[in-house]
Amino acid sequence: MNISIKTTALSTLALALVACGDDVAEDPVVGSEMADTETAMVDEYDPMTRDYMLGDDAQTRRDAFDSDAFRSEYRTYRDEVVNEQVEQADATDTSQDMSDDEREEMEAASQERDGETNMRLRQNMTWGYLDRNDDDQLSVAEYAIWAIPLNPQHEAMNDQGEPELKADTINKAADSFFYYDNDGDTYLDRREFTAARRGETFDS
């Protein structure tokens, strides 16, 4: 009789412990609002600090990357973001007519900036800030605004005597882009960019 009571008590205790284990929080889904919030609370990952192992398909897309077209697109987008502060200041009078997303962008634009370039610090670069053509995806050049250091302009000089990126810098940014382009469409969607921002590793 006593043995039966003790066994029942132990079984009840074991079930209680198992139930407690069910309350363990799961990792947030990459690209979800929770994941984006957690990303903002930790140090911003620097994608230029590691080497990337690309799969065969990703390497094929990487080999087709046009660095000359990238340079032109990147230069255009970089000029836009460098001049953003003036444009935003001109729009403050109409802020009452802005949507919530537009107000969020204006708030981010008002945060501390890099003293030399007037670019936002990387942790303040929102999706809307990087998606320069508003197609809800990032090209390599749009992604590179975030990935490449804020002030790389003294790396090299072109034939016209203008500062430009070194080939090594472009290659590193492209490597990381195609590493995170999981669906192979040569763009990053919000989920893929969140993975890049978190510095997730997919190496087997």
Image: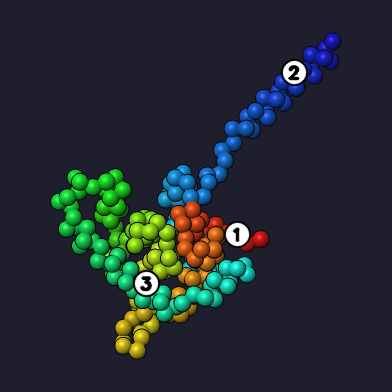
For the residue marked with disc 2, what is the amino acid?
Ala
For the residue marked with disc 1, what is the amino acid?
Phe
Q: Distance between the residues labelled 1 and 3?
A: 27 Å
Local crowd at mark 3 within 10 Å, few (<14), some, or many (≥20)? Answer: many
Question: Residue 147: x percent and y percent?
Answer: 43, 65
Q: Distance between the residues labelled 3 and 2?
A: 68 Å
Q: CB of mark 1 within 8 Å of CB of mark 3?
A: no
Please count the marks in the image.
3
Residue 169 seen: no
Question: Residue 181: x percent and y percent?
Answer: 52, 62
Name the residue: 65% across, 28% down.
19
Q: Is mark 1 on a helix, strand or loop?
A: loop
Question: Residue 184: x percent and y percent?
Answer: 54, 63
Q: Which of 155 and 70 is in front in this view?
A: 70
For the residue marked with disc 3, what is the amino acid?
Tyr
- Residue where numbered disc 3 is placed: 74
Q: What element carries label 3?
A: helix
**Is 5 above or below relative to 25?**
above
Question: Residue 66: x percent and y percent?
Answer: 46, 77
- Residue where numbered disc 2 is placed: 9
Side of 58 where 121 appears, left or right: left
Hey, which quadrant is residue 79 in on the image? bottom left
Q: What element carries label 2?
A: helix
